[in-house]
Image (cartoon, grey):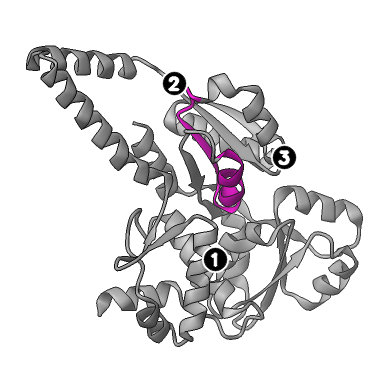
Amino acid sequence: MKFMIDYAEAWKINRNLKTSFTEQLVRNIRWSIFTGEVRWTEKLPPIRTLADALGVSMNTVRNAYKRLEQQEMVVTKPHVGTIVLTESMDKRQIEEELVTSIKNALYCRLSVEEVRDIVERVLREASEVKKKNLIFVYEEKNIGHRFAMQIAQAVNAQVEEVALDRLEDYLNEHRDQIEHLDAIITTYFLYAQVRSIARSYQSIIYGMTVELSSRVIDVLTSLKAGSTIAVICRKEESADGFVNLVHRMYPDLNVEVYHETEQSKWKKIARNVSALFASPVLTEKIRQSGDCPMLIYEMWDRINEQSMNMLKDYLH
């Protein structure tokens, strides 16, 4: 029972939002996967069980699972259920292949000592590599560079920054070098797009979660219960993490999400909300437009510590 109470709290549906229950559930589960609340290969609750726990219809849960499966975040297996699917599941296949190779070596009459020497030599050579080779995929250059530098310093890596709209061309142009990459890194928001573009390559694709800036936390904390805040984003997915965090940390606040193209509404939005948030690039664009008289705050500040530690564990 405790297992289900945890999910019911983490994926709680906000019935005051205009966003559909299915979309809310997709966002909540996706966020839990990237923050580590739901582990790789972990089985998700049965449809009926989760529907009862959240107080929604079975169709809502079923449709959410289907959406996640289309995004290659989960896989549903007959007589097993729905489990979290990530690139890390390939580790089992690698382990099986390694075991098979060792058995074949022994079968071909290499001694145990010879096999051990080979394995130790490979491990020693691998440990002598000082820096990991990573690609960080960004959508907005300024914040992409900031996150890439944080990753480079934290994991002692050589990080090349690649724009999302250039990723496919970059991979094609550097095809021979890609096999030597340790990972392709991006943010939680862009993970599905990056995975779709890079799916034919063998590199691990890792999605990082990010944290609210201290200034944003101060602003949110100062608002009265029932206040409404607005988020302006380029893509709805880029607001997912922010909306999820606000709902968890400040459940009494209302959050409205608007698209960059709705510039004609910016003045009206500013008049009707208590605070306005956007990504760094959009923040500057909105300020320069003169269409929004109120102060605008950047949403994100740094890579989430838990997410960074998980990346360190994987790379080392």
Q: Which residue is mark 2?
A: 131
Q: Earlier in the sequence, mark 3 or mark 2?
A: 2
Quick one: which residue is furthest to the front in this view?
Answer: 108
- Measuring 90% from the left and 62% from the top, which residue is drawn there? 291
Q: Which residue is mark 1?
A: 67
Q: Using the image, determine if residue 87 lies above or below residue 158.
A: below
Instruction: Tell me the residue at 61%/41% (across/down).
Output: 197
Q: Quadrant of residue 295?
A: bottom right
Measuring from the top left, give residue 297's x and y in whole percent. 70, 58
Few, some or many residues within 10 Å of mark 2 (<14, 14–19, 20+):
some
Q: Nearer the viewer, mark 2 or mark 1?
A: 1
- Pointer 1 local density, CA inside 10 Å: few below 14, some 14–19, many at least 20: some
Closest to the observer: 182 or 36?
182
The range drawn in magenta is 179-198
Image coords of residue 300 (percent x, y):
61, 52
Q: Which residue is mark 3?
A: 165
Q: Residue at x 90, y 67 (%)?
A: 264
Residue 110 is at least partly visible in this image: yes
Judging depth in this view, the residue of 180 and 110 nearest the camera is 110
Q: Residue at x 68, y 40 (%)?
A: 164
Q: Give me the C-alpha separation between circle 1 and circle 3.
A: 24 Å
Q: Secondary structure at mark 1?
A: helix
Q: Name the front one of labels 1 and 3.
A: 1
Res 249 seen here: no
Which numbered mark, 3 or 2, is in the foreground of this view? 3
Q: The disc labelled 1 sits on which kind of residue?
A: Arg
201 left or right of 105? right
Residue 195 sits inside the magenta stretch: yes
Mark with earlier residue (2, 1): 1
Q: Give the total number of marks visible in the rendering.
A: 3
Structural distance between the alpha carbons of marks 2 and 1: 37 Å
Instruction: Name the one closer to the observer, 123 or 195.
Output: 195
